[in-house]
Image (cartoon, rainbow, N blue to C red):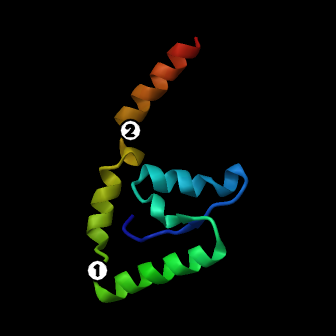
């Protein structure tokens, strides 16, 4: 946590998981669909890190506060879904 990760969205489930995780973490802009966009996004993040605009601790807090790390909300939604199917 605290280090940006860019993913290249593909056409299969395994190549789309990263996009799903980034969206839940509040960083959907880090999921891109072309190689050129991937290189551009990585370059932008590298520049932010070099210039000091990127703050690792802020990213950690953002992820911790996101739906990705909200175990209680996930458990509640999952329970409701299972009960609905029963």
Q: Residue 2 in the image: x percent, y percent? A: 36, 68
In-front residue for pair 21/28? 28
Q: Secondary structure at mark 2?
A: helix
The residue positioned 46% from the left and 63% from the top of the image is: 29
Q: Do the residues bearing badges 2 and 1 touch, measured as CB atoms within 8 Å? A: no
Q: Residue 82 in the image: x percent, y percent? A: 54, 19
Picture quadrant of residue 59? bottom left
Q: Residues within 10 Å of mark 2 (few under 14, many from 20)?
A: few
Picture quadrant of residue 60? bottom left
Q: Which residue is mark 1?
A: 53
Q: Residue furthest bottom?
A: 50
Above or below, 62 against 80 in this view is: below
The residue positioned 49% from the left and 83% from the top of the image is: 43
Q: Residue 81 in the image: x percent, y percent? A: 51, 22
Q: Which residue is mark 2?
A: 71
The residue positioned 30% from the left and 57% from the top of the image is: 62
Query: Seen in the image, is 75 located left or right of residue 60?
Result: right
Q: Residues within 10 Å of mark 1 (few under 14, many from 20)?
A: few
* Viewer-nearest of discs 2 and 1: 1
Picture quadrant of residue 76? top left
Q: Secondary structure at mark 1?
A: loop
On residue 4, which mark appears? Answer: none
Q: CA distance from mark 2 to mark 1?
A: 30 Å
The residue positioned 68% from the left and 53% from the top of the image is: 14
Above or below, 40 against 83 in this view is: below
Q: Quadrant of the C terminus?
A: top right
Q: Residue furthest top?
A: 86
Above or below, 32 against 13 in this view is: below
In-front residue for pair 18/72? 18
């Amino acid at each position: 946590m605290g280090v940006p990760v860019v993913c290249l969205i593909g056409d299969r489930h395994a190549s789309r998981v990263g996009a799903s995780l980034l969206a839940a973490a509040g960083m959907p802009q880090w999921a891109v669909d072309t190689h050129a966009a991937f290189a551009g996004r990585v370059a932008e993040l590298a520049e932010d890190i070099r210039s000091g605009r990127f703050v690792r601790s802020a990213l950690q807090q953002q992820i911790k506060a996101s739906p990705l790390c909200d175990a209680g909300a996930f458990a509640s939604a999952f329970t409701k879904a299972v009960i609905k199917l029963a």
